[in-house]
């Protein structure tokens, strides 16, 4: 029979001391809230990073390939990719898909409003999966009829609201060149990415329009968008793609194209670490306080146990078992609270955000089993290691004085 464990159980379950019960409940609540906040913090930060990253890479791609020249304008220089370049991308096991595109600055003039925009030209090979997920209304461009496709355009919800446009409306777009070239388009789709840098600056149309306006050849393009399978390998894959390109081309990762967004996302990790440390400190302080009060309230009992021959180490074990019991209850309740709130938000999106400020209309949640397990293990380990110090107080208690203590 484990004597220390038995006594600890009697103290924890059948204690009738009102004050210590209050302190114990506060300690349990502290551990519960600390764990729940840590779990939700990690899940929310990871959710933010994943959602925003997917928004950006879904529209721009992970790696862009374009002509290596001194052109720094929005309008990319034309090139015809070599067969070796296309074959290399097709045979690259890290590449999910790739697609050609081109860009050209333009001005929309409609409803007595003027808006500068960047026209993104794509062709029939374009992967519409991402855009379809973010369609606010309408449909995508129909490339089945090439003549019809050149008159269709997709705009963002931001641009539609700014210019008071809707599906089916027509407007004139003046492409920036000398002289400016006007073209009429019909809106077939309105998308809402939620990232102002994208929604405010881009519309989507047929690549052949740019070819005709710039007198390009039928197979010339402005660039290639590449989607990779594993974003965590972005730098490695981007470097590999660049090394295999022909000399006239260069590549750029999405992190280089939108440095402000990805720098902001990396700073969120710092906030998470600070919050985790603060919450862990709160939980530990609560447990230390509870343990010290329990030891002081049980001074008579400690003296009696020592008088009967129990060693300091055995008495320490009693209070450590008791502390472990309290931490365990706090962990169970913390997991229920943290996971419960997390899954409630995940399925209902009950907590909303201002999309113009945060790029998202709701608080995102992304739980990983490894994160939950690590937080639980770390909480137990840190609490018990730290609690060794106050538990050593029992070695300073004299049996004779303790028995007299009231």
Image (cartoon, rainbow, N blue to C red):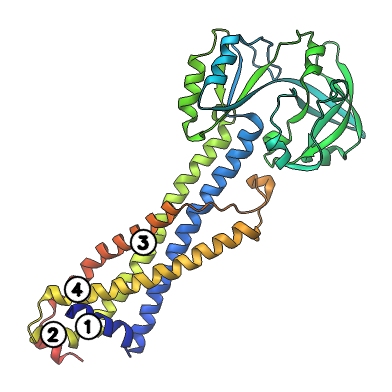
- In the image, residue 157 sits, relative to residue 215, either above or below, namely below
Please rate how many residues cluster around mark 3, counting C-alpha atoms within 10 Å: few if below 14, some from 14 to 19, many from 20.
some
- Residue 317 disc label: 4
Q: Give the spatial CA distance, label 1 vs label 3.
A: 29 Å
Q: Give the spatial CA distance, label 2 vs label 4.
A: 13 Å
Q: Quadrant of the N terminus?
A: bottom left
- Residue visible at 56% across and 10% down in the picture: 84
The location of residue 120, given as percent across then percent down, is 74, 25
N-term-proximal mark, 2 vs 4 = 2
Q: Give the spatial CA distance, label 3 vs label 4.
A: 23 Å
Q: Give the spatial CA distance, label 3 vs label 2.
A: 32 Å
The location of residue 346, given as percent across then percent down, is 60, 57
Residue at label 2?
305
Q: Quadrant of the C terminus?
A: bottom left
Q: Are marks 1 and 3 in contact (CB under 8 Å)?
A: no
The location of residue 13, given as percent across then percent down, is 33, 84
Q: Give the spatial CA distance, label 1 vs label 2.
A: 11 Å
Nearer mark to the viewer, of 3 and 2: 2
Q: Are marks 1 and 2 in contact (CB under 8 Å)?
A: yes
N-term-proximal mark, 4 vs 1 = 1
Q: Secondary structure at mark 1?
A: helix
Q: Secondary structure at mark 2?
A: helix
N-term-proximal mark, 1 vs 2 = 1
Residue at label 1?
7
Residue at label 3?
281
- Quarter where residue 161 is shown: top right
Please rate how many residues cluster around mark 1, counting C-alpha atoms within 10 Å: few if below 14, some from 14 to 19, many from 20.
some
């Amino acid at each position: 029979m484990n004597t220390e464990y038995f006594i600890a159980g009697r103290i924890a379950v059948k204690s009738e001391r009102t004050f210590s019960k209050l302190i114990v409940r506060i300690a349990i609540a502290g551990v519960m809230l600390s764990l729940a906040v840590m779990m939700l913090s990690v899940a929310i930060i990871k959710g933010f990073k994943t959602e925003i990253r997917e928004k950006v890479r879904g529209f721009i791609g992970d790696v862009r390939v374009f002509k290596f020249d001194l052109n720094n304008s929005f309008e990319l220089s034309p090139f015809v990719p070599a067969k070796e370049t296309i074959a290399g991308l097709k045979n690259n096991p890290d590449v999910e898909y790739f697609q050609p595109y081109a860009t050209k600055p333009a001005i929309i003039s409609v409803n007595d409003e003027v808006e500068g925009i960047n026209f993104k030209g794509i062709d029939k090979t374009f992967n519409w999966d991402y855009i379809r997920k973010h369609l606010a209304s309408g449909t995508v461009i129909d490339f089945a009829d090439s003549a019809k496709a050149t008159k269709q355009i997709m705009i963002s919800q931001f641009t539609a609201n700014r210019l008071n446009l809707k599906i089916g409306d027509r407007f004139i777009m003046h492409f920036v060149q000398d002289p400016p070239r006007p073209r009429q388009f019909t809106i077939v789709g309105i998308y809402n990415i939620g990232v102002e840098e994208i929604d405010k600056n881009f519309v989507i149309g047929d690549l052949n329009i740019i070819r005709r306006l710039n007198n390009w050849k039928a197979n010339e393009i402005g660039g290639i968008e590449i989607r990779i399978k594993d974003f965590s390998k972005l730098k490695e894959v981007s470097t590999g793609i660049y090394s295999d390109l022909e000399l006239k081309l260069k590549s750029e990762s999405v992190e280089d194209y939108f440095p402000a967004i990805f720098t902001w996302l990396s700073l969120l990790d710092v906030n998470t670490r600070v919050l985790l440390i603060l919450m862990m400190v709160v939980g530990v302080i609560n447990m230390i306080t509870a343990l010290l009060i329990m030891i002081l309230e049980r001074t008579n009992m400690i003296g009696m146990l020592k008088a009967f021959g129990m060693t300091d180490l055995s008495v320490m074990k009693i209070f450590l078992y008791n502390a472990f019991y309290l931490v365990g209850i706090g962990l169970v309740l913390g997991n229920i609270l943290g996971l419960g709130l997390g899954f409630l938000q995940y399925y209902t999106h009950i907590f909303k955000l201002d999309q113009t400020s945060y790029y998202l209309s709701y608080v995102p949640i992304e739980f990983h089993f490894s994160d939950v397990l690590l937080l639980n293990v770390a909480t137990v380990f840190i609490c018990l290691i730290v609690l060794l110090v106050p538990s050593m107080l029992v070695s300073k208690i004299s049996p004779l004085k303790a028995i007299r203590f009231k």
